Amino acid sequence: MTTPALLPLSGRRLPPLNLGASAFPHHRATLRLSEKFILLLILSAFITLCFGAFFFLPDSSKHKRFDLGLEDVLIPHVDTSKGGKNLGGFLIHGQGHDEHRHREEEERLRNKIRADHEKALEEAKEKLKKSRDEIQAEIQTEKNKVVQELKKKDSKPLPPVPLPNLIGINSGEPADPDIREKRNKVKEMMKHAWDNYRQYGWGHNELKPIARKGHSTNIFGSSQMGATIVDALDTLYIMGLHDEFREGQEWIDKNLDFSVNSEVSVFEVNIRFIGGLLAAYYLSGQEVFKIKAVQLAGKLLPAFNTPTGIPWAMVNLKSGVGRNWGWASAGSSILAEFGTLHMEFVHLSYLTGDPVYYNKVMHIRKLLQKMDRPNGLYPNYLNPRTGRWGQHHTSVGGLGDSFYEYLLKAWLMSDKTDTEARKMYDDAIEAIEKHLIRKSNGGLTFIGEWKNGHLERKMGHLTCFAGGMFALGADGSRDDKAGHYLQLGAEIAHTCHESYDRTALKLGPEAFKFDGGAEAVAVRQNEKYYILRPEVIETYWYMWRFTHDPKYRQWGWEATQAIEKYCRVSGGFSGVKDVYSSSPTYDDVQQSFFLAETLKYLYLLFSDDDLLPLDNWVFNTEAHPLPVLHLANTTLSGNPAYR
């Protein structure tokens, strides 16, 4: 990476170029013309066009094929004895009769044009009598009518669907007063982040806590879509911050509009918006969240209109036009993006009864199953036009990460009936263990990246989620290797804790190396930042749930204190640019995933296991909990596992 513009922006995700609206300011020349004059110009152009069409109507005596809907024009084959005239093998029937009909049609057309001109002139005169304010009011009224019609069209009632059995959505109070105090501290941090966003960035996608204003990046397009509101809803709910939850719900009901001319990341909008809305619906039962999720999903479907069915990375919500990131290998789509749709799309089909969403993600799976994989590994790039792999680069960090996570979670979410997904996960993890997982000279287990036939001994903060994934997938693994994968998860958790512990701030860098004398430390300046990422804390939480080893709560509390000390500012929370400096500078961004993931995982770490138990809930890659679809509740039909 060479510039902060290339930073991965959230959860398991990839670095879009940060060419937001500010990068390309729009300049408009302001013309001081009155609206009446502009209207007259338009009207005169229209009249000129119509009279031009009138005077250039074809002469029927010269062009026998002009017929305005007449059937008898050119008929092949001719018998000259029947009164016709043979012209090059075609017969022109009844010429005299046709010429008379042509003249009548032309006269009728002239009269219609004259009448239309007169009507248009009268309407224009009436308009010009009105004041500027009246004209603007009429325009606004017409626009409002169109918007209301579109809303009616998009708000079709969805079929009633029985909710899965929802367990553990408002519990988890720990008996230990010390743990309860830590949990309450995390809740206070959430309130600080939310209240400042509410005051300074409301409706914007994210917050600049030092400048105290809204912030956005190109993954959300050019519109204010309230990403932080949607992303934070379920965290607010499980923390019992119900007044704040209702504030967010009201904004979504009145302001969240997807009929905007804005190009967004399909992946980011899916995991943050659709995932967040679905989780808020399941937790609260409020229909508005389900309706909005389905509306947005419909806007993402055109991204799948490619020769292979592998979706584009970006889609314009209004036009449906899709494209890929310019920096991705030869116009490729990215494994972690098109491979991180399954959970949300299966739930969409479950809630709507419409198999289109399920079919889209199953098509991706089937295509991947047919493809050759070098060394059993999935490359990060796939061309959606040709169906061929791009550059042979494999990573369990950015570009690849959540693809593997969603294979495992598809199996878990299906109540462990989607054995096809489990097999794909097991096969992939075996290849990753063989080719990517190594021990450093100092005994730290790490996951490298496969690039051009060799292993790069570097691990990203994003990759640290894998410790939790290995623990989550331990039960049900092949050859009774549950203990092995739980131990592997613990080793990854330890390595990632070391990456935090070896910094001045006790916060982890974006990436760290295992070369020579450098172990679990960042070498490059542009890899030393911390942007409030959740992956290490996520792994601590999963390891705590499966082992109850108190060190994971201890490590989580260390991270909580470091975030509070070095990232908290009066206007919210900010990332820092160098975790090895004792007096770091801020990046002035409060990421939406800080509220969705980092603070949620910390709160769960200091809660009892009966809050969102893992037998009943599966978390998407943005930490939005979705219920397990037990077989009796499931209405999907494309996969035998769902029948």
Image (cartoon, grey):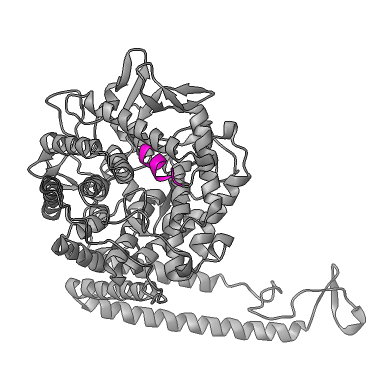
Q: Quadrant of residue 231?
A: bottom left
Q: Residue at x 54, y 52 (%)?
A: 419
Q: Looking at the image, is 30 positioned above or below residue 397?
A: below
Q: Looking at the image, is 315 positioned above or below residue 252?
A: above
Q: Quadrant of residue 73?
A: bottom right
Range of residues picked out in magenta: 467-475
| Residue 243 or residue 520, whichever sits in front | 520
- Residue 523, given in percent of the width and then of the height, sits at 30, 19
Is 582 left, or right, of 44 in this rendering? Answer: left
Is 579 left, or right, of 98 in this rendering? Answer: left
Q: Looking at the image, is 460 positioned above or below residue 127?
A: above
Question: For the view shown, which residue lies furthest in the right direction?
Answer: 81
Asked whether residue 544 is drawn in magenta, I would say no
Whether residue 379 can be seen here: no
Q: Residue at x 27, y 27 (%)?
A: 499
| Residue 522 or residue 617, whichever sits in front | 617
Q: Quadrant of residue 503?
A: top left
Question: For the view shown, which residue lies furthest in the top direction?
Answer: 516
Q: Main secondary structure of the magenta part?
A: helix
